[in-house]
Amino acid sequence: MAQIIADRRDVDFVLHEQFDVSRLSTHKTYAEFNKKVMDMIVSEARTLAVKELLPVMKTGDTEGCRYETGRVKMPDAFKRAWYLLEKGGWFAPCQNPAWGGQGMPHSLNVMAQNYLFGANMALMMVAGLNHGAGEILERFGNDTQKRLYLEKLYTGQWGGTMALTEPESGSNLGDLQTRAVKNQDGTYSLTGTKIFISGGDQDITANIIHLVLARCENAPPGSKGISLFVVPKIHVNDDGSLGAPNDIACTGIEEKMGLHGSPTCTLALGSSGLCTGTLVGEENKGLAMMFVMMNMARLMVGAQGLACASSAYLHALEYAKTRIQGPLPAGGDKTSVAIINHPDVRRMLLTMKSYTEGMRSLLCYIGLLEDEKQICDNDTEKQGYQDLIDILIPVGKGYVTDRAVDVCNLAIQVFGGYGYTCEYPVEQIFRDVRITTIYEGTNGIQAMDLAARKLGMKNKRLFDALLAQIRTTIARARKIPDLADLAETLDQAVVTLSDTADTLLAALQDDRALTGFAFAGTFLEVTGDLVMAWMLLWRAAAAKEKTAAGASAKNTDFYDGQMYSARFFMACQVPVTLGKMASIRAMCPAAVQIRNTSFSGK
């Protein structure tokens, strides 16, 4: 069953042939992660996913979470899976081993997440929160907070959440109203309501450690006046044992389109005036601390999107190979054939294949940049890695999840009417993946981050560094006869993207700013398209070089597949991208000029 989550041959190709990730083992930080160990870890993730997580995926969806007498009950089948995730150390794979993490390279973890997220996104949605909460405490918490909470979070013995959103404060956290009043003993009393809190309550772990954003007394208005607090569901005594319950009540869970096995909770803090927590770092520095961790959180969301797309594609591919339906639309043979032979189905499958492969490479590349940054001793080079991470994160989160939804949608289309039924898993995968375009900053926010912040940052240094990396691959591909025309296509598109970026930047800096913002989403799309084209060209170059060096017969089809993905994307997607770039440069102001009443409706 492993083939319906992620293609192991492709995972190995990205890890070892495109990026040679095992070279990280030459540095002491990752010394134990040689190729053999990396392969073993991926195999362990695949085995756990196939044997334990995948079999309870549908059960979690149909059984769902239940809210009973103020408590949330998770699907019973998830409890064994959680235990096995805990036993395998999957709650904090990249975090500090001194506190219970595994110290794994981020690039390797992204590949393992292909299987874990793809097998059971609802369960992994809750489990995946622990490392972020723990890493904030590791970086900014005091010694007592680390001693009491960190190891329990990193090992999965306790759950963790990020309690940010409020009824009147969605994406604009500067408007949040939760209050924190300092007590004489140095703790803080909190009152307020938090909504859409993933894993806000559950019955799998003995405790849940909430990281809560709140506003202290006399705090500055807006985002500058937000502080961060550790607020445990159950108070923890100084010796680490559990004490009395905190004044945190789950008042309900959302009925959602998907992720039925993942509780999305409303939490009431301090209903009886007895909710207490401790400050993380300094007052009014909470949002800055949260955003330090945002890159990795958004990379994780991208990985969730990729995992769903990968699974949906492989389900569709398997179905297309076995579903016999009608003769080919041309030629005299009237024999019914498997639908994989029909041209329109082949177009859909190759579209899904190229996006899935490009997304897998991109997310591994971003993880590898983080690994390179960790082991780099040169401050200038370290900043260079960070610049590339910063410019690529909106693409890795926003573009990847948008395309993941498209891939899952196409999977349903390949199945036809059966895809719309619960008989096959693609309808659940589509429902589950849809949220990835919304949380950790909606994709509109990712687009504004790219266009209005990252693009012009440091006099366009981040964006220019990205284009320089793309041109490095173009130069490599130009030396390979079968890829020279693809390299030229991408090179011309990169020139156009640079011109388009200049047009957008100019608009954002003059009286056309609102119109410029209306095209931020389109700019994210075109940037993402060319990043996909870059990754696919990079893959094709690696495959061609392997073929030229004498690849074995069993690898021939796989390597040829890389060439077809790249050629299809360059010929069928990049021309559309050029048209979108032309629309950006035209800067049509209709979207901002239309009057509210002209949208019609009552």
Image (cartoon, helix red, strand yellow):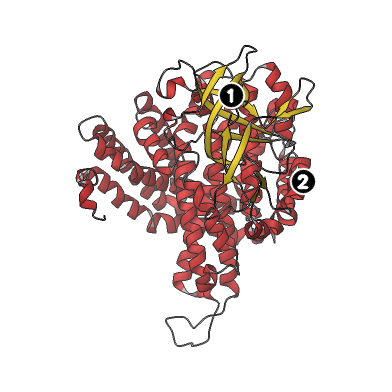
Residue designated by label 2: 84
Which quadrant of the rendered structure holds the N terminus? Answer: bottom right
The amino acid pointed to by label 1 is Phe
Q: Which mark is residue 597?
A: none
Q: Residues within 10 Å of mark 2 (few under 14, many from 20)?
A: some
Count of marks overlaid on the render = 2
Q: Nearer the viewer, mark 2 or mark 1?
A: 1
Give the residue drawn at x 62%, y 37%: 249
Look at the image and tell me in which quarter the C terminus lies. Answer: bottom left
Determine whether 120 is above or below 506 in the image: below
Taking 542 as reference, is 156 above or below it?
A: above
Q: Is residue 64 visible?
A: yes
Q: Which residue is at 50% across, 83% downward?
A: 326
User: What residue appears at the point 63 percent right and 38 percent down from the top-left corner?
Assistant: 21
429 or 180: nearer the viewer = 180
In the displayed structure, does residue 364 sit left or right of residue 333? right
Instruction: Report helix, strand or loop for mark 1.
Output: strand
Image: 231 above or below 544 = above
Q: Nearer the viewer, residue 95 or 580?
A: 95
Q: Identify the element where label 2 is drawn.
A: helix
Res 229 label: 1
Report the Cα–Cα distance between label 2 and label 1: 30 Å
Q: Residue 593, position in %: x, y? A: 19, 44
Amino acid at pointer 2: Leu
Left or right, 107 with reference to 102: left
Query: Percent position (x, y) of residue 61?
Result: 62, 57
First-in-chain label (2 vs 1): 2
**Residue 589: horizontal and vertical position, in percent?**
21, 44
Q: Is residue 541 visible?
A: no
Query: Which image quadrant is residue 20 in?
Result: top right
Residue 223: give x, y in percent of width and height. Answer: 43, 24
Nearest to the observer: residue 185 or residue 347: 185
